[in-house]
Image: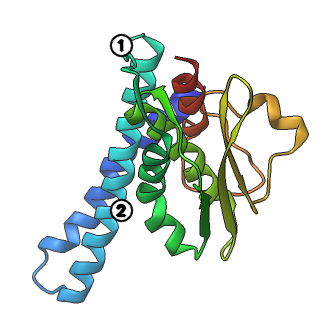
Amino acid sequence: DDFTSCTHESISLPPFFEKFLRPLVQQDISDSKKITYLNIQKKQLQKLNFLIHTLLKSSQLENGIIHLHREYLPINNTILSSIEEILLSADKKNINITYNNSKDYLIPHDSRWLSEAIFNILDNSIKYTPTNGEISISIFNTEDQLGICISDTGIGISKYNLNNIFNRFWRENRIVTDGNGLGLYLFKEIISL
C-alpha cells in the first residue's frame, strides 16, 4: 500500500504537467502567466526528481549495492557539508541552525553517506519546525563512541509513533508537509551499514 501511494504520486504528475503545458502554446497568454506556469512545472519536476533519486537510494541500500568507503576524516567537514545543503530551506522558514563545532574529531566514516544521513535528519527538522524556529547540532564523545545530537523546536514525535519513524513511507499525520516518508528510513539504512 505504501509503495503504491508513493508510485501513484509519480505516475499522476505527467497529467499535471500536461495541464500547464497546454496554455503555454496558446498565442493569447501573457508572458507573466507563462512564467507562472513554468515555475509551477519547475517545482513539480524538482519533486519528481527528488522522489526518483530517493527511491533509487532506498533500493540500492536494501539490495546491498551501496558500500561505504570509510576514511579517517574530520567530522566537522561532513556535518558542515550537510548544513550547507539545507541552508536554503532553513532560510525560507527563517530557521536558525547552530552547530557547536569547537572541537573536531578525526573518525573513520564515509563522508558522502554520513552527510546524506545527517541531511535527512536536518531536512525532517526543517519540515516539522515552525517558522522562526531553531535547530541545534552538537557532538558528544563517550569512552568509545562519538555521537551527533540534532535537536529542534519542532512539534516532536508522539511517544506512540516512536517505533514507526524509521519505517519506509511512514509519516507523522499531525501536520501536512512535503515529503515521501523515506528520509528517516534512509537515515536508518545508512547508519546501519
Q: Is residue 78 left or right of residue 126?
A: left
**Where on the picture, by quarter, is residue 163?**
top right
Q: Is residue 124 left or right of residue 87?
A: right
In the rendered image, the vertical position of residue 27 relative to residue 73, given as above or below: below
Residue 7 spot, x, y in % from top left: 45, 33
Q: Nearer the viewer, residue 3 or 52?
A: 52
Residue 193 spot, x, y in % from top left: 52, 17
- Amino acid bearing label 2: Lys
Outermost top residue: 64
- Mark seen at residue 120: none
Q: Nearer the viewer, residue 191 or 139?
A: 139
Q: Residue at x 50, y 46 (%)?
A: 119
In the rendered image, the vertical position of residue 12 relative to residue 187, given as above or below: below
- Mark seen at residue 43: 2
- Amino acid bearing label 1: Ile
Q: Residue at x 30, y 71 (%)?
A: 39
Q: Residue at x 13, y 77 (%)?
A: 26
Residue 53 spot, x, y in % from top left: 35, 36
Residue 72 spot, x, y in % from top left: 42, 28
Mark 1 crowd level (few <14, some 14–19, many ≥20, 10 Å Cα): few
Dot 2: element: helix
**Where on the picture, by quarter, is residue 95?**
bottom right
Q: Which residue is mark 1?
A: 65
Dot 1: element: loop
Give me the C-alpha separation between circle 1 and circle 2.
Answer: 30 Å
Q: Nearer the viewer, residue 120 or 151?
A: 151
Scheme by which the image is coloured:
rainbow
